Image: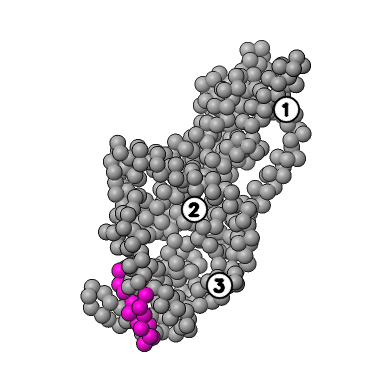
């Protein structure tokens, strides 16, 4: 139940973010005196609406976003014949360039504000930073074969019982056997283990489904438990996928070594700005790497291993949010929302139609073209013909739609999971 609740909450949070994106456009447009006729949450058939002043507000049947109608956003949307003389002065394109830029950028700025506030709350009152000894602690725990157990794992055995785990997952064998976070595995099936690499190599030689004796050091004492490895799909060095045995453990780092430190509301502002800068940098890197992610996504759909850093759709992000709520990882839940808001905000400013960044680029191009024409003593060439840009716009829509369909499919048939 907690998993479903988490999915619903995350999907709702995304819908609210996108609705606030459109609200940012509307608020700034109204502030500059532009004529705004509609503001709706969702698409498709209207479920409910009301008029306040000149604007219709409402809710539509498909909750996949929202929209705002500002008269004169593009020549394709404008019909000045239906406007009175006062309203003709209020159409979008007649307003100063800086005002149009503010309105167009307001959606992305809204995402940045949402992300910054959520991140500030985490940094100031919850904590997201790590101790500098983190890397050293990781190395030491791997050398001792200390493990953290996964309550749920992704198995290639689709008929295995799932228990309380999400669909497509089973209870982790090590977790079921009573192995705890921080325990050190000393031997598997009679073979001594002296480190993390040794553990992985030894377990890989086991037969999935056949119980084995695992010797564990826990709290200074050794004990032997019976663990039944599960079959997991892993990617080999040559890019192929093979099925091997796994216990459902990962490398362990003591939380005391890498604590999450809340820095307080004042210091949190500077820390949040620093983390935001790092996130923006990583987002630009991720955008540059998107084309290289297409082939691995297709391989994942065809049964290959799904990389943890592969792109996810709203479906995948919501599933991750569901897992985070299921295992009471609320800080991770809100951090994922921060990352998503920053990504959407930056992506929406790319200078391509139909994104807001494309409209901003056209507005500045029109201004530059008019300035050059005036300097040369030539007539103002006027507004850009959007009809000539429609083939490029449709091409971008098709590419983005195809990529979205690819990620949604991967998130359904081979989803990324937190606990594996």
Say whether residue 333 is left or right of residue 309.
left
Name the residue beneath numbered marker 2.
318
Per the image, is 52 magenta? no
Residue 45 in view (yes/no): no
Q: Residue at x 41, y 51 (%)?
A: 333
State yes or no: discs 2 and 3 in contact (Cβ < 8 Å): no
**Rendered image quadrant of residue 253:** bottom left
State yes or no: discs 2 and 1 in contact (Cβ < 8 Å): no
Name the residue beneath numbered marker 3.
236
**From what the image shows, is residue 174 above or below residue 397?**
below
Whole-Å distance between the Cαs marked 2 and 3?
Answer: 29 Å
Secondary structure category for the residue under label 2: helix
Find residue 240 and report its horizontal and vertical position in percent: 60, 72
Whole-Å distance between the Cαs marked 1 and 3?
Answer: 52 Å
Find residue 110 and report its horizontal and vertical position in percent: 48, 35
Which label belongs to residue 384?
1
**From what the image shows, is residue 317 above or below residue 144?**
above
Magenta span of residues? 175-195
Q: Nearer the viewer, residue 4 or 95?
A: 95
Front label number (2 vs 1): 1
């Amino acid at each position: 139940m907690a998993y479903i609740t988490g999915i619903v909450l995350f999907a709702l949070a995304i819908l609210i973010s996108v609705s606030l994106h459109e609200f940012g456009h509307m608020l700034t447009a109204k502030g500059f005196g532009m004529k705004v006729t509609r503001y709706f949450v969702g698409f498709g058939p209207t479920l409910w609406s009301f008029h306040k002043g000149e604007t219709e507000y409402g809710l539509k049947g498909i909750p996949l976003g929202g929209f705002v109608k500002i008269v004169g956003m593009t020549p394709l949307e404008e019909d000045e014949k239906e406007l009175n003389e006062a309203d003709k002065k209020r159409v979008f394109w007649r307003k100063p360039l800086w005002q149009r830029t503010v309105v167009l950028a307001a959606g992305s700025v809204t995402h940045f504000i949402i992300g910054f506030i959520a991140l500030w709350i985490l940094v100031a009152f919850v904590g997201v930073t790590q101790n500098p000894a983190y890397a050293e602690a990781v190395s030491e725990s791997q050398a001792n074969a200390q493990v953290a157990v996964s309550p749920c794992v992704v198995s290639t055995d689709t008929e295995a019982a799932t228990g309380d785990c999400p669909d497509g997952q089973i209870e982790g064998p090590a977790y079921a056997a009573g192995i705890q976070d921080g325990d050190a595995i000393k031997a598997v099936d009679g073979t001594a283990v002296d480190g993390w690499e040794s553990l992985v190599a030894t377990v890989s030689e086991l037969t999935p489904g056949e119980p084995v004796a695992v010797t564990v050091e826990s709290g200074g004492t050794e004990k032997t438990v019976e663990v039944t490895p599960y079959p997991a799909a892993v990617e080999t060095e040559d890019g192929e996928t093979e099925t091997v045995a796994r216990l459902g453990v990962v490398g362990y780092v003591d939380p005391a070594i890498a604590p999450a430190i809340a820095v307080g509301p004042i210091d949190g502002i500077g820390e949040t700005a620093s983390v935001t800068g790092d996130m923006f940098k990583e987002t630009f890197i991720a955008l540059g790497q998107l084309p290289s992610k297409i082939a691995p996504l297709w391989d994942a759909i065809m049964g290959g291993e799904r990389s943890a850093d592969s792109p996810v759709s709203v479906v995948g992000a919501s599933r991750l949010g569901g897992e985070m709520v299921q295992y009471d990882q609320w800080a991770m839940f809100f951090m994922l929302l921060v990352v998503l808001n920053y990504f959407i905000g930056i992506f929406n400013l790319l200078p391509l139609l139909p994104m807001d960044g494309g409209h901003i680029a056209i507005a500045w191009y029109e201004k530059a073209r008019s300035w050059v024409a005036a300097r040369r003593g030539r007539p103002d060439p006027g507004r850009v013909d959007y009809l000539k840009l429609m083939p490029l716009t449709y091409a971008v829509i098709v590419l983005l739609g195809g990529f979205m369909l690819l990620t949604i499919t991967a998130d359904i048939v081979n989803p990324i999971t937190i606990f594996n």
